[in-house]
Image: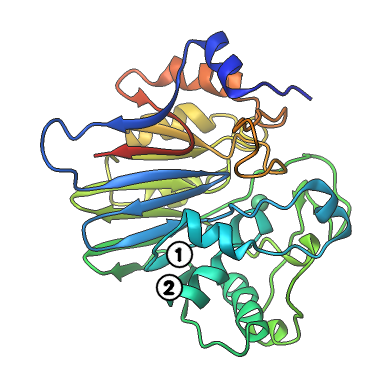
Amino acid sequence: MKTLPLTKFADQTGIPFESKVDRTQGSSSKLSIRFLGTAGFIVESADRTIVLDPYVSRPGLWDHLVGPLRPNRDLILNIIPRCDDVLIGHSHSDHLLDAPTLAIEYGARIIGTETTSAIAKAAARHAGNVEIETLVTQGGEDIACGTAIVRGVPSFHAPIAPHLSIGKYLGDGVPFPGTILEEEGETLEWPLRASQFKEGGVLDWLISISGLRILHIDSAKFDRIELERLDVEKVDVLCLCAIGWQKGNPDYVPYLLERFQPRYIVPCHWDNFFDPYRSATREARVWGISRLDSFIEAIQDHATKSELILLQLDGVIKL
Ligand SMILES: [Zn+2]
């Protein structure tokens, strides 16, 4: 497994890791997009804060093995100071663990699959039967978030170990397959072990906010039929999941870049999510399975009209 500190990776590839990128060109900033590591982002306009797949707690490998996984409330509130809506692409712990805290503490609405809702409600029950708002979607419907509109796009999870299937732990190469119905969720005892965060189906997210379009590819595999029928020609920002990118669609990078012609491409989920959010060196690490170096090369080979922006954890783009 290859691991490199960010600074060394940047030196070797000539692609700097950015902490702040301003593309507002003199106008007052309308929108900021902050990268939280894994598939997590904060998208913030003047009147709405939408958080995608927050996972700053990042329990270590040992916690994953012996469980259960606990969100780090103080860290979550420190890094995400406000939130109106939380969009969850699928229900694995590295996408969902921190979301219930945002709903419990800020009253944020959680939008995602039924499995996501069932797990979030288990956390709310554990917090003293706190009433939280969840909105279950199968995708394909426009959902108002203030003046922003979000739409889930049905998608797939990249197989982490293709051709390997060990039942409930690794079905068809995808970790922890299956769903949790709302009524099944009523028996869940929070906190959960990693294996209890069932995948629950996958949604990519199309976000229209402040006159801009963001497409968040939640896992490195897509459903071509769903993307073809999407009535969108171009997006401004493509948040592109790296982990497992060589194991899903063979044309993962070229198809998405051609189909959506993004102005900006922001790779995500390339970091080793067993590392703490703010380690002493502030170095996240390139994890072998993500192959960030060849991912960057593939993007550069096909991104003729797009700008690649590699954000550090906490890095922000202003548009
Ligand atoms: Zn996953």
In the image, residue 265 sits, relative to residue 110, either above or below, namely above
Q: Circle 1: is it few (<14), some (14-19), or many (20+) Cα within 10 Å?
A: many
Asked if the residue at label 1 sits under 8 Å from ligand 1, the reply is: no
Q: Amino acid at mark 2?
A: Ala
The quadrant of the picture occupied by the N terminus is: top right
Would residue 106 be found to the left or right of residue 143 on screen?
Answer: right
Give x and y (percent) for residue 2. Answer: 74, 22
The quadrant of the picture occupied by the C terminus is: top left
In the image, residue 191 sits, relative to residue 94, either above or below, namely below
Front residue of 231/47: it is 47
Whichever of labels 1 and 2 marks the residue nearer the N terminus, that label is 1
Q: Residue at x 54, y 29 (%)?
A: 251
Would residue 234 be found to the left or right of residue 176 on screen?
Answer: left
Instruction: Using the rendered view, name the quadrant where residue 118 is placed.
Output: bottom right
Instruction: Evaluate whether residue 48 shows in this view.
Output: yes
Please report contact status of discs 1 and 2: CB closer than 8 Å, yes or no.
Answer: yes
Q: Residue at x 21, y 57 (%)?
A: 46
The residue wearing badge 2 is: 108
